[in-house]
Amino acid sequence: MEGLDKSRDLSLYIHVPFCARKCDYCAFYSVPVSGDDERIEKYMSFILAELDALSREWGRAYKTIFIGGGNPGLLGYERILRILDKAMENGRSEEVTVEINPENVREDISILSPAVTRISLGIQSMSDSALKTLGRNASRKENLKALSILSSSPFDWNADIITAIPGTTEKDTVSDIEEVASYNPDHISFYCLTFEEGTPLIKREKPLGEDKEESFLLSGWKALERLGYEHYEISGFAKKGKRCRHNLVYWNLGQYVGIGPSAESSVGYSSIVSMRDSETLDDYLKRPEMTCSKLRKEETEEEFLIVSLRIKDGIDKEEYRRRFSSSFDERYGKAISTLDKSSYIDTPERFALTEAGFMQLDWIILRLASVI
Ligand code: SF4
């Protein structure tokens, strides 16, 4: 694999492109299937073959593994275990996450342990009317059942919550967070609803508007912190010691390989090679094929800014020097002096955004990237 740096760790992402039906807000690549669709077994044979080739090339354990979707829960637990058996042939990973939608969480989910260490549960909302607006498959009742099963399971687990859903109030956001937190998840991912081009949602509903979205987000952030979750990434909240290690690989621009239709990879160090597996399921089932593009050093640096500023720890200036052979302060000092002082923390070791900075993340990235 072009650009793979064998002196560094490698994480693995496996994309499962199947959903029972498409949610109305979703722009991720996935195809609706029923549980016995013959494409599922075909997909399995290609994924296992890709894993086999990759494991032979890499030759050691992956740092972390994330099986995401789509809804990997649709594969059923036995297939998930078959994938992980193959993926961990060279040794166990320190964290193995599987995304599962609430309707696929069964009482016997602990059979996924110890291969799986972490479950990510797409709750999104606790209100039936908001779930309907989103076009989710699961109801409040199914969400409650999944929360209850996971709260007494052996896994670390995450719950996704979406705010600023049309028809909901700021109070609803806080009450969703409080209700989900009462089941004691180790991690909560908390996002503002985005209206993606081409989705049924954008044709039917209007966003609440920037002011409301900001205010909903702030109330949610406050509630999560009050409930003992550290705001360590713009959308990530974790109990002590429970940050998602796989996502931290992304935010630290670590190496990861993604397999499965439309999965992305990023390998290398000061100039990364970015890859994408076959765009669609049909193409993938003909023959998986990675398309590669080598980023120039400046493009890698921009990518580094984009991902690192999402995390509370921000940019490690020494790591920046090692990667790009220049001084962060010399490169960005002037641009930083034009930012609002409440939006960042700048020390000799690190440059990081505050919550006020997270609110202006895109603008700050533009400002800093303009000097590259
Ligand atoms: S389950 Fe997830 S991936 Fe599938 S359509 Fe819904 S949001 Fe998209």
Image (cartoon, rainbow, N blue to C red):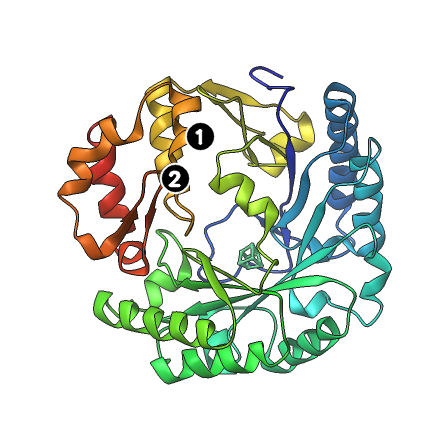
Quarter of the rendering occupied by the C terminus: top left
Q: Position of residue 296 (x, y in %)?
A: 37, 17
Left or right, 260 with respect to 229, comes to: right
- Determine the image quadrant of residue 153: bottom right
Q: Please name the residue shown 55% across and 36% down the image.
A: 262
Quarter of the rendering occupied by the N terminus: top right
Q: Position of residue 70 (x, y in %)?
A: 60, 52
Query: Tag on residue 319?
Result: 1
Check disc 2 and report its element: helix, strand or loop.
strand
Q: Is residue 326 visible?
A: yes
Marks 1 and 2: CB-CB under 8 Å?
yes
Task: Give the residue number, with chain letter if any, for mark 2.
Answer: 315
**Type of the residue with mark 2:** Ile
Crowd rating for badge 2 (residues with CA inside 10 Å; few <14, some 14–19, many 20+): many
Q: Please name the residue shown 51% across and 81% down the image.
A: 178
Q: CA distance from mark 1 to mark 2?
A: 8 Å
Query: Tag on residue 268?
Result: none
Seen as rendered, the residue at the extreme left is 338
- Determine the image quadrant of residue 338: top left
Pick the residue in front: 372 or 195.
Answer: 372
Using the image, determine if residue 243 lies above or below residue 256. Answer: below
Q: Please name the residue shown 68% across and 42% down the image.
A: 65
Q: Position of residue 127 (x, y in %)?
A: 50, 82
